[in-house]
């Protein structure tokens, strides 16, 4: 899961990032509403955790703008005010849930999981393409009775490709979606993990390949039976 945290209290933002990283979520953190809106508009996130009182743009303004632009990413608003008026305003702006500070990390994670499930009627446990199946809980890739466990970054790259098998992904898009906008990852990082995955496909005897579309990017393909 990929989460955007928009929180101007630096210590709290770092604590939230740590809590989510421990769950193996990918987290991007920004500290003002304008930057938060720019990141959120990318459409990369499964859930946005958004403080109400922010510099440059309030959380309310960010949510209104997202919804006006047809961005439906679930938003969890955070506030220090235990005021019913603020809660109603936030929900009327288009937020999906609301938490008052202070709160427990366990409750925050539970609400994030609940919001992520709302994006679809079905919570997928696995993805399939041609003769390959990727288990989303165990990071296991299998073909028939043969299987291999993927490293976390291998899993993230393959999940991206298998979720959108008709799309060609440029390297820069893979870096943003897997490593994050602020990461130091470069093209050779993507190339390395594509190579690792190809070796796993070969080990499994799969007909699937990650093809290189010259000067564009990568996509999944399968040989004809």
Image: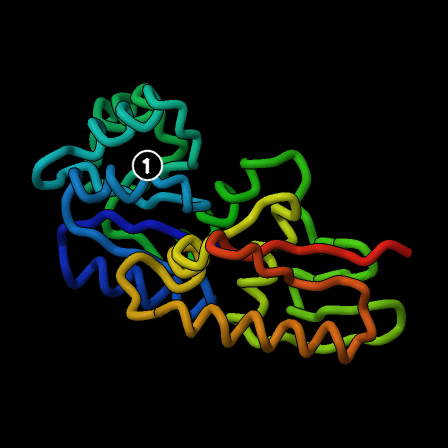
According to the image, label 1 marks what residue?
41
Residue in view at x 88 percent, y 68 percent: 144
Q: Is residue 2 left or right of residue 209?
A: left
Q: Nearer the viewer, residue 161 or 222?
A: 222
Say few, some or many: other residues with alpha carbon within 10 Å of mark 1 (under 14 / 14 to 19 / 20 or more): some
Q: Is residue 127 left or right of residue 98?
A: right
Q: Nearer the viewer, residue 196 or 159?
A: 196
Examine the image and state in which quarter residue 224 appears: bottom right
Residue in view at x 63 percent, y 72 percent: 197
Q: Position of residue 86 (x, y in %)?
A: 22, 27
Where disc 1 sits, the SS reads loop
Q: Position of residue 136 (x, y in %)?
A: 65, 60
Examine the image and state in which quarter residue 203 appears: bottom right
Say how many tags the image has.
1
Examine the image and state in which quarter residue 82 appears: top left
Residue 3 sits above or below residue 147 on the image = above
Q: Residue furthest left?
A: 55
Q: Position of residue 167 (x, y in %)?
A: 58, 45
Q: Position of residue 30 (x, y in %)?
A: 21, 52
Q: How is the image coloured?
A: rainbow
Q: Is residue 118 left or right of residue 101?
A: right
Q: Is residue 55 left or right of residue 93?
A: left
Q: Quadrant of the C terminus?
A: bottom right
Residue in view at x 17 percent, y 39 percent: 33
Q: Nearer the viewer, residue 203 or 17?
A: 203
Residue in view at x 14 percent, y 50 percent: 8
Residue 67 sits above or below residue 105 on the image = above
């Amino acid at each position: 899961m990929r989460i955007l945290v928009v929180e101007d209290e630096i210590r709290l933002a770092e604590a939230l990032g740590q809590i989510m990283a421990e769950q193996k979520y990918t987290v991007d953190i920004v500290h003002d509403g304008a930057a938060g809106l720019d990141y959120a508009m990318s459409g990369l996130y499964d859930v946005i955790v958004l403080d109400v009182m922010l510099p440059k743009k309030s959380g309310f303004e960010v949510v209104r703008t997202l919804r006006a632009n047809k961005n439906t990413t679930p938003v969890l608003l955070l506030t220090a005010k235990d005021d019913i008026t603020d809660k109603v305003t936030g929900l009327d702006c288009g937020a999906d849930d609301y938490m008052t500070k202070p709160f427990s990390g366990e409750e925050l994670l539970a609400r994030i999981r609940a919001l992520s499930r709302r994006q679809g009627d079905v919570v997928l446990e696995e993805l399939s393409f041609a003769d390959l199946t990727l288990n989303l809980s165990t990071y296991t890739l299998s073909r028939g009775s043969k299987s291999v466990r993927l490293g976390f970054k291998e899993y993230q790259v393959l999940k991206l490709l298998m979720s959108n098998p008709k799309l060609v992904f440029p390297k820069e898009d893979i870096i943003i979606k897997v490593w994050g906008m602020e990461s130091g990852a470069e093209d050779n990082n993507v190339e390395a993990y594509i190579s690792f995955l190809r070796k796993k496909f070969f080990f499994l005897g799969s007909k699937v390949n990650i093809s290189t579309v010259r000067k564009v990017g990568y996509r999944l393909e399968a040989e004809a039976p």
